[in-house]
């Protein structure tokens, strides 16, 4: 018999956080989240900024006294206000390969969301599109890059068999540094765009991080406004993200673009520290954090986390300028590959830009939805 329980106590929450170690035992590609980050996010008493506009009820599934799955039912008032929608979300989904267990979890989350008055359930969003988002459907033979999701290959079928439909597909593109740096077309497009728009790229000033982070927030919330699933970052969220990413940041890979001196866009790439985090088994302290500094030079991949142009400056080829600048910086630092992720299937402008730099789709992710 399968029993689904609410997560209520501190011990319940820690069991919820640690459950993935059971699912991914022996998986050579899984990269555990840092327990510290998961505690900050999943313990409401720690005042993570998500709780300023959202709620989460966590559930765990048990069979014969053993934990066999977990899920969160998520209420995101900011999303529904922004999109004038009536959607609830599920996230943090992990489950053994058992359809009955999956159905027990998904149905429990659905009932919780119906109590909030929602008519649809969408996900996985853990807890929104600004965090872990999507379910891997292709590309299981490779470890996830930093801040990207990973899951067993049987997960999508568990959802499809429960009546979920695919709402959107997300892509991760692979860029080969050797191919990109020899790209004459990219160089020509970038040169023309720079001249026509009087476009100038500058690096982030880490000594003025507070004001620079506000520029990131401004561009993000303007450039991504029309995108599917977009939720604006609050000030508290962007401040927390900047704090969490600061140890991994390289100023030469965080770029702002200006047209005639006016802020026009940004590109943010970070080294794939998952190469190192994978060795930490979810624990940063007492000594694992030192690996961030001692093994950094072994990292071969970058992740292009953000590349966005404010709408009034779009369709000028400015993305080519950013790609060229990132490729030049990556070459200087001996990175061999980059992942650009995630990209919406219908984001034609971004996809065209990635095709110019010879990027290839090598991973796919799914967002599911279901009427409830």
Image (tube, grey):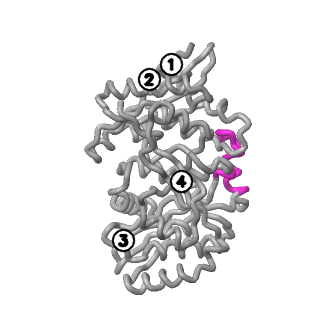
Q: Residues within 10 Å of mark 4 (few under 14, many from 20)?
A: few
| Image location of residue 121, percent across then percent down | 39, 35
The Cα–Cα distance between marks 4 and 3, rounded to whole angstroms, is 27 Å
In the image, 254 versus 45, the foreground residue is 254
The Cα–Cα distance between marks 2 and 3, rounded to whole angstroms, is 44 Å
| Image location of residue 137, percent across then percent down | 57, 46
Region of the chain picked out in magenta, as a range: 274-295
In the image, 169 versus 298, the foreground residue is 169
Q: Where the N terminus falls, by quadrant?
A: top right
Q: How many marks?
A: 4
| Vertical arrangement, residue 285 with respect to residue 261, above or below | above
Circle 2 sits on which residue? 108
In this image, 155 relative to 346: left or right? right
Tell me which numbered mark, 4 or 3, is placed earlier along the sequence. 4
Q: Is residue 342 magenta?
A: no
Circle 4 sits on which residue? 245
Q: Residues within 10 Å of mark 1 (few under 14, many from 20)?
A: some
Secondary structure, mark 2, is helix
- Tag nearer the camera, 2 or 4: 2
Residue at 44% from the left image edge and 85% from the top image edge: 192
Tell me which numbered mark, 2 or 3, is placed earlier along the sequence. 2
Secondary structure, mark 1, is strand
Mark number displayed over residue 4: 1
Circle 3 sits on which residue? 314
Q: Residues within 10 Å of mark 3 (few under 14, many from 20)?
A: some
Residue at 55% from the left image edge and 36% from the top image edge: 157
Tell me which numbered mark, 1 or 2, is placed earlier along the sequence. 1
- Tag nearer the camera, 1 or 4: 1
In the image, 246 versus 75, the foreground residue is 75
Tell me which numbered mark, 3 or 1, is placed earlier along the sequence. 1
The Cα–Cα distance between marks 1 and 4, rounded to whole angstroms, is 35 Å
CB atoms at circles 1 and 2 under 8 Å apart? yes
């Amino acid at each position: 018999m399968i029993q689904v329980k609410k997560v209520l106590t501190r011990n319940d929450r820690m069991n919820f956080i640690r459950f993935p170690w059971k699912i991914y035992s022996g998986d050579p590609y899984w990269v555990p989240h840092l327990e510290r980050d998961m505690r900050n996010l999943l313990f409401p008493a720690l005042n993570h900024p998500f709780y300023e506009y959202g709620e989460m009820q966590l559930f765990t599934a048990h069979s014969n006294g053993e934990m066999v799955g977990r899920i969160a039912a998520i209420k995101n008032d900011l999303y529904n206000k922004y999109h004038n929608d009536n959607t609830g979300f599920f996230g943090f989904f992990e489950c053994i390969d058992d359809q009955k267990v999956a159905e027990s979890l998904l149905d429990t989350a659905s009932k919780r969301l119906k109590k909030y008055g929602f008519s649809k359930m969408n996900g996985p969003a853990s807890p929104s599109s600004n965090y872990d988002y999507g379910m891997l459907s292709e590309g299981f033979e490779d470890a996830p890059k930093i801040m990207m999701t990973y899951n067993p290959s049987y997960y999508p079928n568990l959802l499809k068999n429960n009546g979920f439909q695919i709402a959107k597909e997300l892509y991760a593109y692979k860029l080969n540094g050797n191919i990109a740096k020899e790209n004459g077309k990219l160089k020509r497009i970038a040169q023309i765009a720079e001249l026509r728009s009087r476009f100038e790229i500058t690096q982030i000033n880490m000594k003025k991080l507070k004001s620079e982070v506000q520029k990131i927030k401004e561009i993000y919330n303007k450039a991504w406004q029309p995108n599917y699933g977009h939720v604006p970052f609050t000030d508290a969220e962007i401040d927390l993200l900047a704090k969490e990413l600061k140890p991994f940041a390289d100023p030469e890979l965080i770029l702002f673009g200006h047209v005639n001196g006016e802020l026009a866009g940004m590109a943010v790439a970070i080294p794939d520290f998952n190469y190192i985090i994978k060795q930490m088994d979810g624990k940063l302290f007492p000594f694992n954090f030192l690996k961030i500094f001692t093994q950094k030079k072994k990292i071969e991949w970058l992740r292009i986390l953000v590349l966005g142009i404010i709408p009034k400056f779009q369709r000028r080829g400015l993305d080519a300028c950013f790609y060229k600048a990132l490729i030049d910086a990556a070459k200087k630092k001996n990175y061999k590959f980059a992942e650009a992720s995630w990209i919406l299937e219908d984001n034609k402008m971004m996809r065209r830009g990635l095709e110019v730099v010879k990027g290839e789709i090598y991973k796919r992710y799914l967002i599911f939805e279901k009427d409830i």
